[in-house]
Image (cartoon, grey):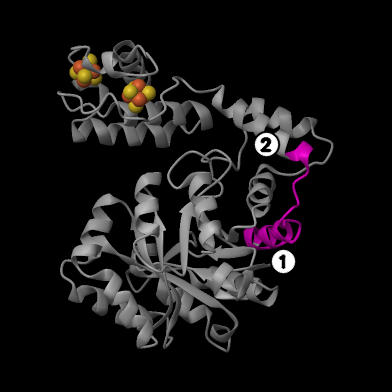
């Protein structure tokens, strides 16, 4: 297994970080739990083959994921790995809940300390809540007490917020959504580079964009097929990520032994500097090929917002584009239906025209909202 440096921490981790959240569930004594007949052998196999980074969270698998990982790491495996787990703001109703949840996590993971402890999924609202609860002071205290080794956060919001958070504390690591389609989304390439300047190691999640990049549509597959070296879409996506020196480890959510073995092989072929100029060009073309499937050139800038009638215009276009880009028809439709129920879908548009006057891309928003709605309901 290729090992990679974790910036200022002075430790090294495996290029492949096992994402534990996707292991199958089963029912034991009427209770839904992780199927440990699948998770334990896969986790131990990965560790036996050089993986030393395990990612879980309090909320994964209906709050049963940490327990399954704790069981898998018995028999001397705990000492061979770094455990990363996360504190969810949405499960904290009062400041004292942070301590309670951390203690519960230590118990579930059957360990005295957690290596990487992340404030989970920081968005504007989660960040504000954590700040009001004194989460930064809590992290400092937990470190001093030896309950956690490194204070970290995972992130899902705009670059501006990412910069604010990164500058608000002496973070040991951050985890961001990043892949070749998200270079300008969320923390993005700019966020990755900022971490590099600060020597803060970055853990990558959503390297396959929730699996969307694992299965290439025809026009993308044709580009991969035309390249002289044959690699799966999954390998191309991970290879592109591993090329960045700022990336410490790339999480890949495995579901079984087969996927674990597949990841071990792929990550053994990926390292900093592995992408040739020709390969970089290929991925640029792949990105263009995906984007050519877009329905509308909405940049998500939000200048059209707020809509006086409550339509979340960029969200509608984002779902519509995603549906077309990655062909995830059912998932996209479900997501859209959720917004219809929320009351911020395109059917709330009364054609006042305010948004069109504000759009720097001069998009025909009203007509496109109508088309998007008719295609997604
Ligand atoms: S035209 Fe429709 S979407 Fe645009 S601001 Fe008016 S109501 Fe909202
Ligand atoms: S202003 Fe135009 S480009 Fe920006 S989010 Fe609204 S529709 Fe999209």
Residue 299, position as x, y percentages in the image: 42, 27
Q: Using the image as rendered, state which of residue 254 and residue 315 is in the foreground.
A: 315
Residue ID at (40%, 69%): 170
Residue that carries the numbered disc 2 in the rendered image: 283
* Quarter holding residue 196: bottom right
Q: Quadrant of the C terminus?
A: top left
Residue extent of the magenta highlight: 258-279
Look at the image and tell me in which quarter the N terminus lies: bottom right
Does the magenta-highlighted stretch encompass residue 278? yes
Residue assigned mark 1: 2
Is residue 53 left or right of 186 when viewed as pictured?
right
Q: Nearer the viewer, residue 97 or 160?
A: 160
Ligand 2's image quarter is: top left
Q: Main secondary structure of the magenta part?
A: helix
Q: Residues within 10 Å of mark 1 (few under 14, many from 20)?
A: some
**Is residue 335 something one can see in this rendering?**
yes
Residue 209 in view, yes or no:
no
Q: Residues within 10 Å of mark 2 (few under 14, many from 20)?
A: many
Q: Position of residue 194 (x, y in %)?
A: 50, 53
Q: Is residue 41 magenta?
A: no
């Amino acid at each position: 297994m290729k090992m990679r440096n974790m910036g200022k921490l002075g430790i090294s981790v495996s290029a492949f970080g096992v994402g534990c959240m996707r292991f199958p569930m089963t029912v034991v004594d009427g209770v839904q739990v992780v199927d440990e007949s699948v998770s334990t052998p896969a986790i131990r196999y990965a560790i036996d083959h050089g993986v030393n980074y395990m990612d879980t969270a309090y909320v994964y698998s209906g709050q049963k994921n940490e327990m399954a990982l704790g069981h898998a790491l018995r028999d001397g495996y705990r000492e061979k790995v770094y455990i990363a787990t996360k504190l969810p703001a949405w499960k904290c109703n009062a400041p004292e809940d942070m301590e309670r949840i951390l203690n519960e996590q230590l118990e579930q993971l059957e360990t005295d300390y957690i290596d990487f402890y992340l404030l989970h999924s920081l968005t504007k609202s989660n960040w504000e809540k954590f700040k009001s609860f004194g989460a930064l002071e809590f992290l400092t205290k937990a470190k001093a007490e030896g309950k956690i080794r490194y204070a970290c956060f995972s992130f899902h919001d705009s670059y501006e917020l990412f910069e604010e958070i990164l500058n608000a504390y002496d973070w040991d690591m951050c985890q961001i959504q990043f892949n070749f389609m998200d270079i300008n989304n969320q923390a993005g390439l700019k966020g990755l580079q900022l971490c590099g300047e600060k020597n803060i190691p970055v853990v990558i999640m959503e390297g396959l964009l929730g699996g969307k990049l694992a299965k290439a549509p025809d026009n993308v597959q044709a580009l991969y097929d035309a390249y002289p070296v044959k690699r799966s879409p999954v390998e191309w996506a991970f290879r592109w990520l591993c090329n960045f020196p700022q990336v410490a480890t790339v999480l890949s959510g495995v579901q079984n032994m087969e996927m674990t073995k597949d990841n071990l092989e792929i990550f053994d072929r990926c390292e900093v500097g592995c992408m040739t100029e020709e390969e970089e060009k290929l991925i640029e073309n792949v990105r263009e090929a995906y984007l050519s499937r877009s329905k509308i050139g909405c940049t998500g800038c939000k200048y059209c917002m707020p809509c006086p009638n409550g339509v979340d215009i960029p969200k509608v276009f984002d779902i519509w584009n995603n549906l077309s880009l990655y062909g995830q028809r059912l998932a996209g439709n479900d997501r859209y239906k959720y917004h219809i129920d929320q009351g911020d879908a395109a059917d709330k548009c009364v054609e006042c025209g305010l948004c069109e006057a504000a759009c720097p891309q001069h998009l025909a928003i009203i007509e496109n909202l109508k088309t998007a709605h008719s295609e997604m309901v």
